[in-house]
Amino acid sequence: MKIPEFARLNLRGVVLSLALVGAMAGVPSAAADYPDSPISVYLPLGPGGATDNLARIATNKASEELGQRFSIEHRPGAGGSVASNTVANASADGYTLLFANFATHAVTPSLFASLPYDPIEDFAPVSLLASQAHLVLVPTDSGIESLDDLIAAAEGDTLRFASSGIGSPLHLAAEFFASTLGVEMEHVPYESSAPALQDLIAGRVDFMFDNISSGKGFVESGDLHAVMVTSQERSTLLPDVPTAMESGLDDFETYGWWGIKAPADTPDAIVERLSEVFQWAMKSDDVVETLESQGFVTIGSTASEFETHVADEIAKWAIVLEDAGLKGSQ
């Protein structure tokens, strides 16, 4: 997957511990003693699912180094704005963090006409943790086997695509797809991916984008056919599914991503400590093995790399939202 070329620091055991001690030398005692109590991580989604699982794996590993547990707090609603606003207004002491994602920090700046917080100014980036590509899925009996078949069908009629809701990553991925192909398509939003997938299997809609982790089982069972994976490289989970580039879309790529953000004005020493620990956690062999088996690409970036990534994502998806007539629509 074409993720920014982040430095892959091999932080392990004593090496990391010594680095962290050095980083904390000479800082105020509040930062030097950090953390001395559990840390709350706010998720913009409900319990269960791939995001919840990723958050627990990442924070459980990080807690091994920090010596404090992480408490996962679920605050769904308003495209992630509920959780984001909670963290933006929390004390900047490193004990309240946001499990940021594509929706909260790549989409909301353009999708919402106004927000109670600033997605950039009100947060301190910590680390981009992981990403996951999408699958383009069609009913098995649709007769569509390849991207060329899907394009031909779209040029012959207006295709209907399902998504997990207006402004969701899966919706915007499909809008980007339609814009790239230069064809008109009809959006059919659902409350979540599960009913959308069931209607896709039944042929009530023509195609949809879905995360590899949730779409993989339907492909393997034969209920759905995967036209392509939206990454630069084939997925090890579905190695027979061609990439967008192999299918003829050289510049097309979509993926979900997840990272840690803290309230703005969190002390630099605390942000740096958190960043180093999450970098180590996401590069630990057991975490990499577990998450890759679920379709994730583990990253573990520096804070500055995460900041650059978010800025690039906001610029990219602002164009997609404008082309789809969704900019400032909520």
Image (spheres, rainbow, N blue to C red):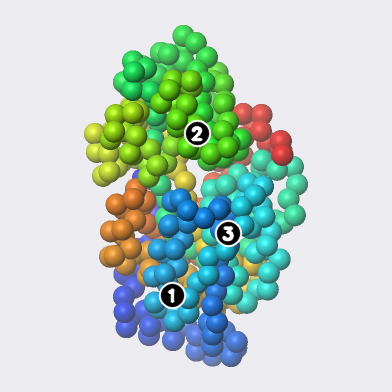
How many other residues sit within 10 Å of disc 3, few (<14), some (14-19) or many (≥20)? Answer: some
Q: Which residue is mark 3?
A: 74
The amino acid on which the numbered mark 3 sits, given as a three-letter code, is: His
Please say if 268 is above or below 57.
below
In this rendering, the count of numbered labels is 3
Instruction: Give me the residue at 71% from left, 35% from top.
Output: 329
Q: Is residue 153 left or right of residue 165?
A: left
Q: Earlier in the sequence, mark 1 or mark 2?
A: 1
Front-most of 47 and 321? 47
Instruction: Give me the residue at 41% from left, 26% from top.
Output: 201
Q: Position of residue 235 (x, y in %)?
A: 29, 42
Helix, strand or loop at label 3? It is: strand
Measure the C-alpha gap from mark 1 to mark 2. 36 Å
Residue ranking furthest to the top: 156
Q: Position of residue 260 (x, y in %)?
A: 52, 62
Helix, strand or loop at label 2? It is: helix
Dividing the picture into quarters, in which one does residue 60 lie?
Answer: bottom left
Instruction: Give me the residue at 34% from left, 73% from top.
Output: 11
Q: Which residue is mark 1?
A: 63
Q: Position of residue 79 (x, y in %)?
A: 63, 46
- Residue 195, label in figure: 2
Front-most of 51 and 146? 51
Q: Nearer the viewer, mark 2 or mark 3?
A: 2
Q: Quadrant of the C terminus?
A: top right
How many other residues sit within 10 Å of disc 2, few (<14), some (14-19) or many (≥20)? Answer: some
Helix, strand or loop at label 1? It is: helix
Please say if 266 is above or below 1.
below
The amino acid on which the numbered mark 1 sits, given as a three-letter code, is: Ser
- Residue 322, label in figure: none
Residue ranking furthest to the left: 240
Measure the C-alpha gap from mark 2 to mark 3. 22 Å
